[in-house]
Image: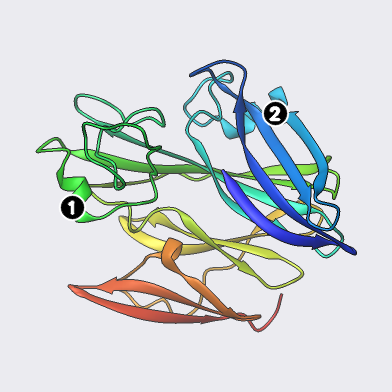
Amino acid sequence: MKFISRSITTISVYILSSFYFQERRGNVEGFYFYVWDKTTDKPFFEKTIAFSEELRKEAKGDATIKTAFNDYFIRDVITRKDGGFIIGAESYYTTSRFNNWNRWDYLYGSPFTNSFNNSYYYSPYYNNYYWRSRSGNNAVRYHADNLTILSFDGNGKIEWNNVVSKSQFDDESDDLLSYMIMNTGGKLHFLFNQQEKRNNLLSDYYVNPEGEITRSPTLKNLDRGYEFMPKYGKQVSSRQMIVPCLYRNYICFAKIDYTQN
């Protein structure tokens, strides 16, 4: 679930977005939107949008068409000047010898409460050694797979959608998985690690205003031995971002400059 505040032309609103289900513990059907007008103190609009079968086929990865979005989590809601907005959602799950993590349980412990109280919803993006260690000696593999990007107009009508196909995994930690967004105005850049010849290579895919996805050339000056943690990165200006990385047993920071869109 995501909640943001923004202005649509001269209207100031709050946007609440989440996945929705038709039944308890059912399959994810689509998006739910609730937009509140701060000026009139009334709802601006409320609606649900079901995912098409075509989008499910593209986004499902190893899942079935019906369960295509069951492992997805909303990662980003990006507003536009024309009143529209873009949602980025990512497939995230874990596997182990004995059981798999899912969005309904607390297999690896809750960061908010103890293991005997399941009144809080578990967040897969809260991850540190203490909570990982509660899973015992079972080897846990973290997965961050396909990224689905959807664009909506100011009334919540879908304009386009696209999928960045990726398959990331790591054992006992998800620090090197997932992605970050670099917004250069004319394009949205999605940066994440891809394994090539047993090495993690920081890759850049960008989407233009029409929803077309293109892979950028390999980033220059990527020194060997450095492992990037893009999901912890931060955009610090219109053309610059800072990304933490690992080098041997040290944590350091890389600066990435975009001289063009």
> Residue at left 51%, top 32%?
61
Location of residue 231 with respect to 19 vertically, above or below: below
> Residue at left 37%, top 42%?
143
> Residue at left 86%, top 44%?
155
Residue 254 falls left or right of residue 215: left
- Amino acid type of disc 1? Tyr
Which numbered circle lies on residue 51? 2
Q: Secondary structure at mark 2?
A: loop
Instruction: State the image coordinates of residue 34 (x, y, percent, origin top left).
Output: 73, 41
- Color theme of the render: rainbow
Q: Quadrant of the C terminus?
A: bottom right
Q: Quadrant of the N terminus?
A: top right
> Residue at left 53%, top 22%?
67
Location of residue 193 with respect to 158 vertically, above or below: below
Choose between 160 and 36: the one closer to the eye. 36
Chain-order first, disc 2 or disc 1:
2
Instruction: State the image coordinates of residue 254 (x, y, percent, origin top left).
Output: 41, 80
- Amino acid type of disc 2? Phe
Residue 219 falls left or right of residue 244: right
Location of residue 220 with respect to 2 vertically, above or below: below
Question: How many neighbours does mark 1 have within 10 angstroms: few (below 14), some (14-19), or many (20 or more)?
Answer: few
In the rendered image, which residue does mark 1 sit on? 130
Residue 119 falls left or right of residue 181: left
